Amino acid sequence: MSARALAAASQPDPADRALEQAHQLLEADPEAEHPWLSPFDAAALASESALVLRDMRRYDEAMRHAERAIVLRESGRARSLALSRITLVRIHLDRQDLDAAVSVGHDLIAADPTLGSVRVVQQLDALRRLLETHCGHPPVRELLTRFDEARRARMLLLADIIQPPSKGTAS
């Protein structure tokens, strides 16, 4: 989180040092107590590294970390995997590689159509807005159609969370 804040504040050298410190702490002893609030593993560090490096516009490095996060999460938590894929699509868009962004976007949508996460839906909405700026590219238009279908399905899953039924109504 420190590295992300430093990268967002356009302080690349301190951001690099914070990332390096996180890598060293995690590699030293994965079972050791860390200053982090929640569990942190190699996949989480790869995801955060990708975000930091993207913020610093170091897209090639960011892409490598995002791809590593995806590999490390493929057999794990669906929500974290989806968020990692969203990051990778955004990096491809930053690099102006529309075909790669579309490919990862299709993987993202196909991976777990029943994933009902408010955070994922919000990030998919933001990603869709970014993709709309490239709707002149036919593969992007096709992906946007799939995004809309997937969003409708996810919103049905989240209906009670986003807009809970009013009191006194029958279920």
Image (tube, helix red, strand yellow):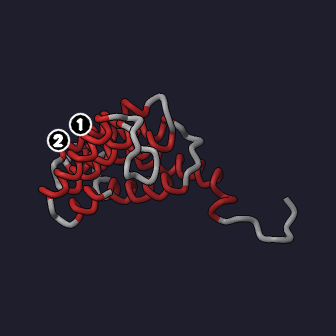
Cα distance in 3D space between marks 2 and 1: 6 Å
Q: Residue at x 47, y 58 (%)?
A: 122
Task: Work out which residue is located at the far front of the displayed protein and give it.
Answer: 32
Q: Is residue 73 left or right of residue 101?
A: right
Q: Residues within 10 Å of mark 2 (few under 14, many from 20)?
A: some
Q: Amino acid at mark 2?
A: Asp
- Considering the numbered disc 1 on the image, is that residue within a helix, a strand or a loop? helix
Report which residue position mark 2 lands on. 60
Say whether residue 4 is visible. Answer: yes
Q: Residue at x 77, y 70 (%)?
A: 166
In front here: 84 or 158?
Answer: 84
Q: Is residue 18 left or right of residue 1?
A: left
Query: In which quadrant is the C terminus drawn?
Result: bottom right
In front here: 123 or 19?
Answer: 19
Q: Residue at x 23, y 56 (%)?
A: 55
In front here: 8 or 15?
Answer: 15
- Which mark is on residue 101? none
Q: Is residue 87 left or right of residue 112?
A: left
Q: Is residue 137 left or right of residue 158?
A: left
Q: Amino acid at mark 1?
A: Arg
In front here: 85 or 33?
Answer: 33
Query: In which quadrant is the N terminus drawn?
Result: bottom left
Report which residue position mark 1 lands on. 64
